[in-house]
Image (cartoon, rainbow, N blue to C red):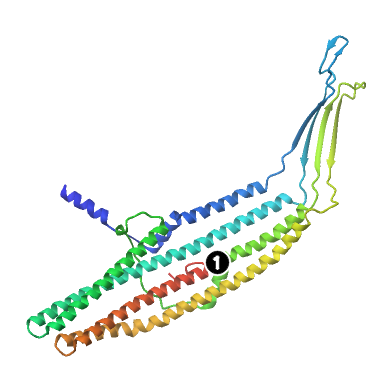
Amino acid sequence: MALGLALCSTLASAQTAYTWNQVKDKFETANPTLKADALNVQEMKAQEITAFLRPNPGFTLSTDGTQIARYQGVWKPIAGTQISPAFSYLHEREHKRELRLESAKQGTQIATSLHSDLERNLIFTLRTAFIQTLQAKATVDLSQKELDYYDHIIEISRARFKSGDLAQIDLDRIELQRVQYESDLQTAEINLRTAKIQLLQLLNDRTPIDQFDVQGPFTFTDQLDTLDSFRQTALDTRPDLQAALQSAQQAVTNHKLAVSNGSTDPTLSGWYTYNPSFNNQYAHQTIGASINIPLRIFDRNQGEKQRTLIDIDRNQQVTEAMRAQVFADVDSAYAQVNSSLVLLRPYKARYLDQAVRVRETVTYAYQRGGASLMDFLNAQSDYRNVQLAYLQLIGSYLSAASQLNLAVGREVIQ
């Protein structure tokens, strides 16, 4: 029983580590903001049915000639009643239904593109939280290693003190410095928990923080495609630009619909009449037909025509502005990625190795009395600063790469 309880406790506290693709898939199926916007696309799709509906026919039933007195001593209240059923139908001309349907479909396309744009922005927010979590994990790992390394130095220093090779004041200064490493570790762990909380909020997940974790490469790729290739990809895939282009197309359709709505629609009618009061025995039953055409003395749709015509120009200008914004976003993000790479390359090629060599050399000399305590503490601080700066640069690079993915419209840098 004790073994079973211990196993259950271990399983309950075990962490589930998600990769980036798993986090993104979970986000796309669980985020309430994204799901609510997807329902808006379905609503726009339902409006296509309404747009293509035909006018309902009209039915009229009229009676006349009902008697209210006796005829030759006999009560015949319905003997002379005239019955006349009639049907009418409004015929829409100039392809009104087709244009309404086309405009509704284009509205659905715009809503779909805007949904993709919302997903693009939310994915960027999710990617930022994911990167912050990876960076916080790397910082916690570095802080823990630094604390373990410094504890080893303290043990050696205590041994030197017992052998009379180290003064009490120097040992106290070394032990006091451990507070800084403990503080750095606690700060890193708090930052990690905060990053996980933000990530869980985006995922709409109620998993305890201790049972949630992410994994992925926290490094950089030295290869970067040309700026022109990213620009072209953005022009082809940016959903907000696609929405602007689709809005311009819809504006043209709406203008055509406004012109079409300005045309007159005739109402066709037909009726049948039964009139028993006619002296002509062959004229009791008659049929008739009529057409009702409104006279367009005043064009009541002229303002809508003008408005939709102006809206075409407005959407064209919005599209041009959006295209310029796409270029600006790509250029800015590309510059940030390139700048991060310029800083990361010397760190990977020289500075990291130099920091390790300096720390090891000064530590070796200090343990044997060849270096002062101040030299040792400075070497330790320099090593940590270089390592933290490298982690921050990788985080900046990954954030800039995520910004470039946002600007392009899809993941071009993993």
**How far from the left and from the top, in percent, is residue 48?**
63, 50
> What is the crowding at mark 1: few (fewer than 14 residues within 10 Å), some, or many (at least 20)?
some
Looking at this view, name the residue that lies furthest to the bottom.
370
Looking at numbered disc 1 in the image, what kind of residue is underneath it? Thr
Q: From the viewer's perspective, is 32 left or right of 385?
A: right
Q: Nearer the viewer, residue 51 or 182?
A: 182
Q: Residue at x 25, y 85 (%)?
A: 378
Q: Looking at the rendering, which quadrant does residue 341 occupy?
A: bottom left
x then y, percent, for residue 73: 86, 9
Does residue 43 lie above or below 278 as drawn?
Answer: below
| Residue occupied by mark 1 | 237
Q: Position of residue 278 (x, y in %)?
A: 90, 22
Q: Is residue 57 left or right of residue 372?
A: right
**375 versus 393 height, above or below:** below
The residue at 60%/62% (across/down) is 243
141 lies left or right of 40: left
Give the residue at the far right of this rendering: 279
- The residue under the point 43% across, 63% down is 126
**Quadrant location of the C terminus in the rendered image:** bottom left
* Left or right, residue 400 beside residue 347: right
Q: Residue at x 79, y 53 (%)?
A: 300
Q: Is label 1 in a helix, a strand or a loop?
A: helix
